[in-house]
Image: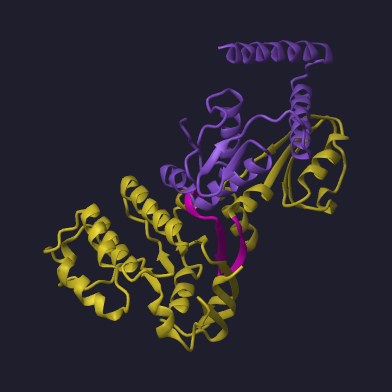
Amino acid sequence: MWYHVNPHSGVPIYVQLKEQIRKAVANRQLEEGEQLPSVRELALQLTINPNTVARAYQDLEREGVIETARGLGSFVARRRQHFGNAQDVALDQALENLMVEAYQLAVDAGILRQRFEAKLQIWQERLRKEQGE
Amino acid sequence: MTLAVELIAISKVYGRKKAVDCLSLKVPRGSILGFLGPNGAGKTTTIKLMLGLLRPDEGEGRILGLDMVRDTVGVRRNIGYVAEVQQMYGYMTVQELLGFCRPFYSRWNEKLVAGYLDMFQLPLGEKVKNLSKGMKTQLALVTALAPDPELLILDEPTSGLDPLSRQEFLRIILEEISVQGRTVFFSSHQLQDVERVADHVAIIDHGKLLAVKPLDELKATGKKIRVVFQHEPGIDFLSWPGVREVNRQGNAYLLAVDNYLPETLGRLQEYPHFTLEVIDQNLEEIFLDKIREERK
């Protein structure tokens, strides 16, 4: 996994890192149970503050994306079936962003529904294929 | 939260000029604080006060729990300091300089010194005055780190270094910090360096503190909203909570928002508009904004 951040952006570095890891987990660049670099390793690799990395990891842990075993390190968590409150809030936010984008792009509800269905299908197929392997 | 630095309303006056003006500042242990300000803002004076090289005219401070004015010796023993202008004895060789510094400290990490001398490839027999600017900075860093200081104070450490040496310098700072839980107080004009490694930022101008915040919080709160209305809404946006500044060009508005960003966006949604977007601000933009506002 190739991590990178842009410190000179208005988006806090810990947010950039979080998004990157979440995306990597979602598209299986990072697999369930895979170990993440330690806070110190990643901080030195990216030349950023260790507290920043620690904060990203803490958030990801709270959201259930990764798990930290004391003394052993951080690992990509097994995907949960049940929805916790944090996931619920995060999903709602993501949907909200989608709606705002769609509104700005003047996409009407019919097209939005169609595209959503199509995208969902692609993802499900991809997941099925990987689980079949 | 224990504090590495706590300054309480310190002032320093030169003639009629207040170099430092009732400045209060807290730096938690284990953090890296970026200390920002334009030239002549009072950064170096503040640092000299912290080091006990100057006495404050008013106010007090504690460095690593020790009284900044009464216990300057105790303070200096636990601080590593890299000055803006390297005032090292140019006639000494690298080896002689290290030997000269060593007896001043009860702790002196020989292994660390050897490691960095090797890493930087510093010529031990060369006279200090013949070293390049980058090498002088590296040597100063070695002498600052050698006594295993709990607090590292760096005054414009990366100015004049090429990008490669700068990156190396920052990495060493991070390495030392992450391992030991030390604190770094770091004044700089190189905002991109500060953005990389600092977790807290303090901004000063004319000797006054304008802001001190975790960097992430500064970025998360200092946003702008650009909105283009379909027709003039006729609202006094400055009366809205959280809106700090309003710029207008016809139907296009640029609002600087410090707080209540989602609420403000929600309210704006209700007026017919063509575009409504949030603009992220990087450290440089936030910095310039704060200074401009102060000087208005």
Q: Is residue A117 above or below residue B170?
A: above
* Magenta stretch: includes residue B206: yes
Residue A63 image offset from top left, x and y in percent: 68, 39
Residue drawn at (49%, 47%) of the image: A39
Q: Within the image, what quadrant is residue B229 found in?
A: top right
Secondary structure, magenta segment, majority class: strand
The chain letter corresponding to purple is A
Residue drawn at (36%, 66%) of the image: B84
Colour scheme of the picture: by chain
Residue B139 image offset from top left, x and y in percent: 26, 63
**B288 left or right of B71?**
right
* Magenta stretch: includes residue A51: no
In the image, A45 versus B72, the foreground residue is: A45
Residue A34 image offset from top left, x and y in percent: 52, 32
Residue drawn at (34%, 49%) of the image: B168
Residue drawn at (43%, 57%) of the image: B179
Q: Is residue A122 above or below residue B29?
A: above
The chain letter corresponding to yellow is B
In the image, B287 versus B116, the foreground residue is: B116
Bounds of the magenta span? B195-214
Q: Is residue B172 above or below residue B77?
A: above
Q: Where is the C terminus of chain B found, in terms of image quarters?
A: bottom right
**B201 left or right of B143?**
right
Residue B227 visible in this rendered orientation of the protein: yes
